[in-house]
Image (tube, helix red, strand yellow):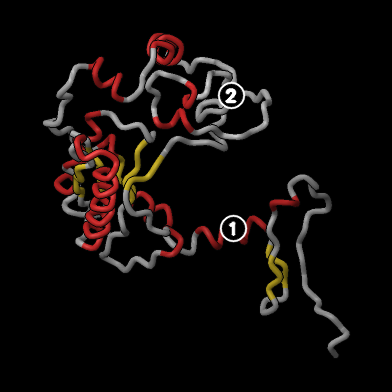
Amino acid sequence: ESQRGLEVEADLPDTTDGRDMAVLLKRIDLEQGRIIDDEELKRNISSARPYRQWIEQSRQHLENLPEVEDSEGLRESLLHIQQAFGYTQEDLKFILEPMASNAEEATGSMGNDSPLPVLSDKDKPLYNYFKQLFAQVTNPPIDPIREEIVMSTMSFIGPRPNLLGMDVKPGEEPPLRLEVDQPVLTSANLAKLRQIDKLTNGKFRALVLDITFPAAEGAEGSKAALAELCARAEASVGEGYNVLILSDR
């Protein structure tokens, strides 16, 4: 009896595109005695739960939240801020200026033949001391505009609930996901994050953590401040905060 095999009825097309076969799904249903094709299988899975409704209910776009007053403006001049963060004349001329004037990213070489920061007598930003080892090849630009099918700058802030694992009961709302269009926040968006608990009725709670320490304490002071910062961040999560803002203001 076990050698007879299984007889199933299948309504399959006479011809199929071999290129598409790699992404097609097939299910053999032993109870119904038939093969379920790709379209029916995906339709049954996608309609099993109100996933679209859950996504729309759980999405909270930072850009769409009401504007709030930004009470944390720059306390130093723009030049001092640029110098503190390591901006150079090259950055302003070849990177920022084309972006501001032409709304496009400047095209440049992947290679970096500038002198090593450890051999320079000039102050360099910390990230200049780290180099990425990769093949020196020429690749076409990739960005979320020309390559929107495979790339996106959308990011999430705070918790990221598993939409496929949610079991939302009637009358309940799914956990919120706070979305931003890009990882670089404007001052207005940062002001919203500071007051995110008011804007979302307490569903998100933000806490600002001070990352400064007295410069006179030197390296030992930075180590102690970093350890304290980690401890405060860990404790704040236990207190119910789900958005942490590290601030030097």
For the point 70% across and 54% down, the residue is 24
Q: Left or right: where does residue 229 sit relative to residue 28? A: left
Q: Is residue 129 above or below residue 229?
A: above
Between the residue at mark 2 and the residue at mark 1, the CA separation in whole angstroms equals: 34 Å
Q: Left or right: where does residue 6 sit relative to residue 159? A: right
Mark 2 or mark 1: whose residue is earlier in sequence: 1
Is disc 1 placed on a helix, strand or loop? helix
In this rendering, does residue 182 appear at all? yes
Quadrant position of the N terminus in the picture? bottom right
Q: Residues within 10 Å of mark 1 (few under 14, many from 20)?
A: some
Question: How far across and how far down the image is residue 80, in percent?
Answer: 24, 18
Question: How far across and how far down the image is residue 4, in percent?
Answer: 87, 84
The amino acid at mark 2 is: Pro
Residue at the right extreme? 3
Which residue was labeled with disc 1? 42
Quadrant position of the C terminus in the picture? top left
Which residue was labeled with disc 2? 141
Is disc 2 placed on a helix, strand or loop? loop
Q: Nearer the viewer, residue 6 or 129?
A: 129
Q: Is residue 19 above or below residue 85?
A: below
In this rendering, does residue 57 appear at all? no
Q: Is residue 198 above or below residue 103?
A: below
The amino acid at mark 1 is: Lys
For the point 34% across and 65% down, the residue is 168
Q: Nearer the viewer, residue 138 or 66?
A: 138
Residue 190: name its quadrant: top left
Question: How far across and how far down the image is residue 56, in percent?
Answer: 35, 49
For the point 31% across and 46% down, the residue is 178
Question: How far across and how far down the image is residue 9, in percent?
Answer: 77, 70
Q: Of the numbered discs in the image, which one, if any, rests on residue 93?
A: none
